[in-house]
Amino acid sequence: GAVVSQHPSRVICKSGTSVKIECRSLDFQATTMFWYRQFPKQSLMLMATSNEGSKATYEQGVEKDKFLINHASLTLSTLTVTSAHPEDSSFYICSAIHRGQGADEQYFGPGTRLTVT
Amino acid sequence: QKEVEQNSGPLSVPEGAIASLNCTYSDRGSQSFFWYRQYSGKSPELIMFIYSNGDKEDGRFTAQLNKASQYVSLLIRDSQPSDSATYLCAAVGSTLTFGKGTMLLVSP
């Protein structure tokens, strides 16, 4: 299957600082990537849809000025958590759409665990 | 509001048995359906997708789709303890919607 990577896998930062998370599609081009957040024992929550070359589409309740998304190329999308607070501590997962035969397939990155102290 | 419903479980089956995971969806416009497996603390991984009515088999896994009943299922034959995980169902129509997942426990 298609491979999506994320970096870093874990990050600890102090309250008030910003953290950038990278999501890369390694062996395919992805015009669309998604960013999710998952709190313990809960399902994935879609934060935003990232389209290459255009502004991201944010889900209701997600602050676009706090969670900056940049999809600058067909293989890279970045999520920057600005002025992080402890309540932003979560598991952040990206996914990319692979245009397969018959249906678009969504592949997930391994996730980034963010801890804000 | 478009919804995908799954029983949260846990669904407990003995090793070697067939595990049956079910999912219903509300959006009749949904075209494609995905099953993901997620181990605790890990990212989801794609198991199968299906978009035509009927069965689709891949190894020990069989996905079943009934669009008239708006029902998708995943069967896991010869269940193994390593299959113990949360299984997420997702439907793609105008949006991508995930269910909350069903926890499967396979006991040795």
Image: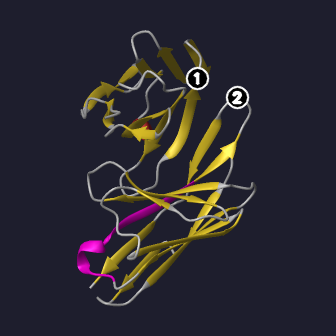
- Against A105, residue A84 (above or below) is below
Closer-to-camera residue (A36/B11): A36
Any mark on residue B51, and which? 1
- Against B12, residue A95 (above or below) is below
Q: Residue B26 at what x, y percent from top left? A: 35, 25
- Against A30, residue A55 (above or below) is below
* Element under disc 2: loop
**Res. A109 image quadrant:** bottom right
Q: Residue A117 at what x, y percent from top left? A: 26, 85
Residue shown at 66%/62% (left/top)?
A52
Query: Decide: marks 2, 1 in contact (CB < 8 A)?
Result: yes
Give the position of the N terminus of chain A as an image quadrant. Answer: top right
**Res. A51 image quadrant:** bottom right
Residue topped by disc 2: A102
**Colouring of the image:** secondary structure
Looking at the rendered structure, the kind of residue marked 2 is: Gly
Are both tags, 2 and 1, on one chain?
no
**Apparent side of residue B54 relative to residue A81 in the rendered image (left or right):** right
Could you tell me which chain the residue with mark 2 belongs to? A
Closer-to-camera residue (B3/A106): B3
Residue shown at 50%/16% (left/top)?
B64
Using the numbered discs, state the Cα–Cα distance from disc 2 to disc 1 in whole angstroms: 8 Å
Q: Which residues are magenta?
A: A84-95
Asked if residue B57 can be seen in this view, the reply is yes
Asked if residue B84 can be seen in this view, the reply is no
